Amino acid sequence: MKTARYFEEQVLRKRPYLKKEWCELILQNPLKREVQKDSRIRFWGIVPEMRTHVLRVVTLEDGQTIHNAFFDRNFGKGDL
């Protein structure tokens, strides 16, 4: 799994509860995938340990290098 420097230095520091394995899981089996205007790619998925929370993982343009990740409180059933 590839990660951006921002993810390693900022995201994991600010969100120590995040697990890299969760991000990898979402990239492999997303509920939804969307390309942003800046060509980064958003992936959403449910982490088994956190059943009621949807994790959003944002990658660089390559779709593999993780740039950001967070639990998306705004993701709803209408988003699928």
Image: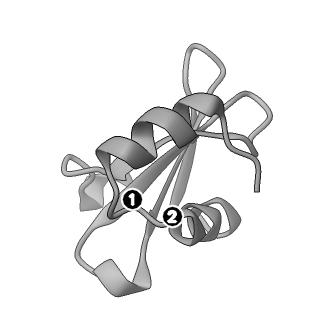
Specify the quadrant of the image occupied by residue 36. Answer: top right
Residue occupying image coordinates x 62% and y 27%? 40
Whether residue 74 is situated above or below residue 36 in the rendered picture: below
Pick the quarter of the image with the C terminus.
Answer: bottom left
| Amino acid type, callout 1 | Leu
Residue occupying image coordinates x 59% and y 14%? 38
Whether residue 46 is situated above or below residue 4 in the rendered picture: below
Question: Left or right: 43 with respect to 40?
Answer: left
Mark 2 sits on what residue? 31
Specify the quadrant of the image occupied by residue 23. Answer: bottom right
Q: CA distance from mark 1 to mark 2?
A: 10 Å
User: Camera-side residue: 18 or 64?
Assistant: 18
Q: Secondary structure at mark 2?
A: loop
What colouring method underlies this structural image?
A: one colour
Q: Which mark is residue 20?
A: none
Task: Please rate how many residues cluster around mark 1, counting C-alpha atoms within 10 Å: few if below 14, some from 14 to 19, many from 20.
Answer: many
* Spot occupied by residue 21 in the image (x, y as percentages of width and height): 58, 71
